[in-house]
Amino acid sequence: MTAVDDDSEVSDVFSWFPVELPARQRALGLFVAKWTIGALRPLVQLKVPDLLAAGPRTAAQLAAATGAEVDPLYRVLRCVAAAGILREEADGVFALTAAADGLRSDADGSVRDMFLFACDPMMWRPYEEVLHTVRTGTPAFDHVFGEPFFDFLRGNTGSAELFDRAMTQNHYPGSDRIFDRFDFSRFPRIADVGGGRGQFLAEVLSRHPGCTGAVCDQPQVVAEARAEFERRDVADRASVVETDFFAGVPDGFDAYFIKHTLHNWNDHDAVRILKRVRAAIGADTGARLLIIDMLLAGPGEWDLGKLTDIEMMVALGGRERGLPEWNQVAGAAGFTLANDPVPGDLALLEYRPV
Ligand SMILES: C[S@@+](CC[C@H](N)C(=O)[O-])C[C@H]1O[C@@H](n2cnc3c(N)ncnc32)[C@H](O)[C@@H]1O
């Protein structure tokens, strides 16, 4: 295997791993992901990428700085370098690459919290029980932890904070295309339902000085949103509304975003949430529901959503959806499609009330 050059682009989940196996053994090549994630997680927990930002270091220097044992630390460093996430130099010195730079805690566009969330026990242990989901149709998360995901977060502050921080790093490649393709300035007053700590709303408001908005999420989540609005310099146009979207959604907005949230829920619950949005819109036929989520491509086509769908099914009992499924849940809540979204990636689906 060769290390990935600092500037190279990785277009495909497993293109890091050119494992040349005969076709019948190819599924075994997937295990390289487990080995690499297992090696990378302790390095990220020990903030090794932060330490390497100052320049290349030996395993012994990194062990001294982190309080780790030299030999096992060397072996996880070597594994992660073989997978192209770090670079091992000829003399056993390890250096940062562009791929590991994003794992620094203070990197611009850091994905450290998203990485730590994705391989945290709360997201890892349900994968021991996927067969349970396949046999019963119920989330493995509930089976493992004894309660649904969002109930678990409400009782586990540390896990909830990791989740909320991870969501602020929830930037799919398709997000930028949405900003290029859609004119958000049509909507002077925007509500972001299930908007987390307000990161997406802040991005919309900073791009569109004529817009105002409110982030509508659970009290413990929106508590952090004001700081995000201050940081993005949009606090004078952004507000916070503590919301349980199963109980009600605030009225008086021209557009209701709901991004990366409906895929957390099964069709029954997705319709319940959308009915709350429909009730908030009332007789204002000019208002719009804007769903931003994966829009599944057709059979046999590559689509990241076909992979993230497993996370939704196993952890949350939710699902990614194709256009017929989106139209069905939105239709059941009183909406009809008003644009022509592109499948196969993150998409914006515009619905008008009927
Ligand atoms: C996967 S996150 C998406 C966050 C954000 N929209 C984004 O794109 O990063 C789902 C959000 O739904 C929120 N949520 C879950 N249950 C909720 C409820 N009953 N009422 C309001 N928000 C809820 C969570 O707090 C979380 O912020």
Image (cartoon, helix red, strand yellow):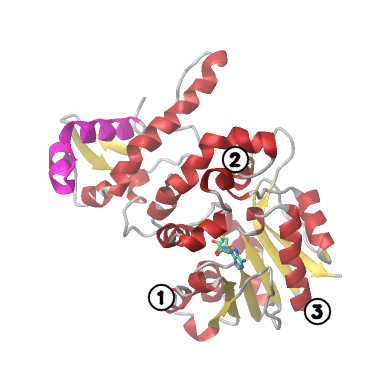
Residue 269 seen in render: yes
- Residue wearing tag 3: 282
Mark 2–mark 1 CB contact (< 8 Å): no
Residue 38: x and y, percent?
37, 36
- Depth check, mark 3 against mark 1: the one in front is 3
Q: Earlier in the sequence, mark 2 or mark 1?
A: 1
The answer to whether 243 is drawn above or below residue 304 in the figure is below
- Residue wearing tag 1: 231
Residue 11 placement, left or right of 286: left
Residue type, mark 3 in image: Gly
Image mark for residue 307: 2
Residue 72 lies in quadrant: top left
* Mark 2 neighbour class, 10 Å CA radius: few under 14, some 14 to 19, many 20 or more: few
Instruction: List the single residue furthest toward the front.
Output: 146
Kindly state the secondary structure of the residue where label 1 is placed. Answer: helix
Residue range (magenta): 57-82
Quadrant into which the N terminus falls: top left
Nearer to us in this view, 287 or 7: 287
Residue 47 placement, left or right of 243: left
Ligand 1 under 8 Å from disc 2 Cβ: no
The answer to whether 335 is drawn above or below residue 15 in the figure is below
Residue type, mark 1 in image: Arg
Residue 134: x and y, percent?
66, 35
What kind of secondary structure does the magenta stretch mostly adopt? helix
Residue 297: x and y, percent?
71, 42
Is residue 29 highlighted in magenta? no
Q: Residue at x 61, y 32 (%)?
A: 131
Q: Residue at x 65, y 54 (%)?
A: 263
Residue type, mark 2 in image: Leu
Kindly state the secondary structure of the residue where label 2 is placed. Answer: helix
